[in-house]
Image (tube, grey):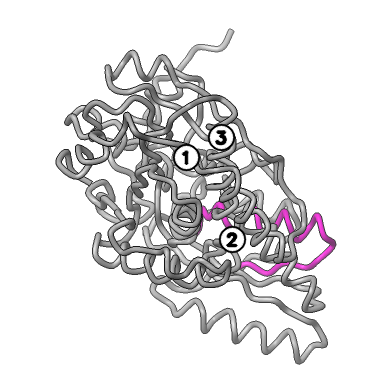
Amino acid sequence: MDKEGVSATVQRSQQRVWPSVARRKDLASALAAFPRVRLGHFPTPLEPMDRLTEHLGGPRFWVKRDDCTGLSSGGNKTRKLEFLMADALGEGADTIITQGTTQSNHARQTAAAAARLGMACHILLEDPTGYADPEYTLNGNVFLDRLHGATVAMRRSGADMASEMELLAVELRAAGRKPYVIPGGGSNSTGALGYVNCALELCEQSATMGLKIDALIHATGSAGTQAGLVAGLAALESDIQLLGIGVRAPQDKQESMVFELAKRTGARIGYGEAIRREDVRANCDYVGAGYGIPTQGMVESVRLLAELEGLLFDPVYSGKGLDGLIDLTRRGAFGDMHNVVFLHTGGSDALLGYPEAFDLPGHQIN
């Protein structure tokens, strides 16, 4: 999204309306048709970031606190797991298999969900960064995966992780287990239902607060969060402008992944025809050298929010999303918008895997 792309939305900002009660009820009814196990604390808070607003001199910034979902240390995957784990239970599964990269927030929350439900959990991790520091390979989310009782195994970088999970599933079935495979990030049309529900939740909160939201910004990677939001906002006929800040893939690939998953998700809830390609926007200028590799902008953004708002963001997803939000604001991309919401997808545990990236000054402890 560039300045011109946002300006068209700004011109409509005075006519902005909340989705009708009828549309919200219809979407809630559609979601109620899917099994769901309650794992999180919802609705998550919607809070102003007034010190950031003052610092940047842009629109008023808000944060949707999906770091407060309550499962393990919280994060966006909890919403997806409520639908995925319910599906697993419905299939009679006793074991969960999933995959991610070394400091995967999804792996941590999946391990916690399995523990909560009394299921075994096997996590396969690959590492695209090449980092060998034990702080990265053993601390942060990796430590929590194991603390939640999951079995953790590494695979080579670039491995076909879907195939690796299926091979493990075959082994477990031969041993008499009933595995259920969850894709990386929980990003399929079942998991994305969690963010259809988030779109509904956000619109209900804004209507109750009398808050007209111009734009919703978030980090986008495995596509499930953005696809669910696209489908949910389309079903509600909301005119909130949605922008994903990419953390891994080039723009064309990222938008294509999101669009295809949004169409499948929309079709499942009866709104497939509402999904438009032009509603899928990703800015992938803030990825840096690659997925999970720190950038200077990410480091500065995470430190800024820690110091201004007392909020912790993660170095892989939300930190790069913040870098995009802050840089675009300084470039004037949000024009005359009044209220911009940043979706906090959680994951601050991963900061413990990246201590050298932040190069914090030493402090004397007396």
User: What residue is drawn where x is 82% and y is 60%?
Assistant: 117
Q: Nearer the viewer, residue 98 or 206?
A: 206
First in sequence: mark 1 vs mark 3: 3
Task: Determine whether label 3 and label 2 are within 8 Å by CB.
Answer: no
Quadrant location of residue 146? bottom right
Q: Position of residue 174 (x, y in %)?
A: 76, 92
| Residue beneath the point at 62% across and 55% down | 26
- Magenta region includes residue 249: no
Q: Is residue 53 above or below residue 123?
A: above
Residue under numbered circle 3: 65
Indicate yes or no whether the magenta region holds residue 122: yes
Q: Name the side, left or right, on which 50 lies relative to 29.
A: left
132 vs 1, left or right, is right
Q: Give the residue at mark 2.
A: 193
Q: Position of residue 292 (x, y in %)?
A: 39, 52
Vertical relation: 64 (above or below) 260: above
Residue 165: percent from the left, percent from the top? 58, 79
- Of the residues under marks 1 and 2, which one precedes in the sequence? 2
In the image: residue 331, left or right of residue 134: left
Q: Amino acid at mark 2?
A: Leu
Q: CA distance from mark 1 to mark 2?
A: 16 Å
Q: Is residue 300 visible?
A: no
Residue at disc 2, secondary structure: helix
- Mark 3–mark 2 distance (CA, rounded to whole Å): 18 Å
Image quarter of residue 87? bottom right
Q: Residues within 10 Å of mark 2 (few under 14, many from 20)?
A: many
Q: Taking 222 as reference, is 148 left or right?
A: right
From the image, tell me which residue sits under label 1. Answer: 343
| Picture coordinates of residue 181, whole percent (x, y) | 64, 75
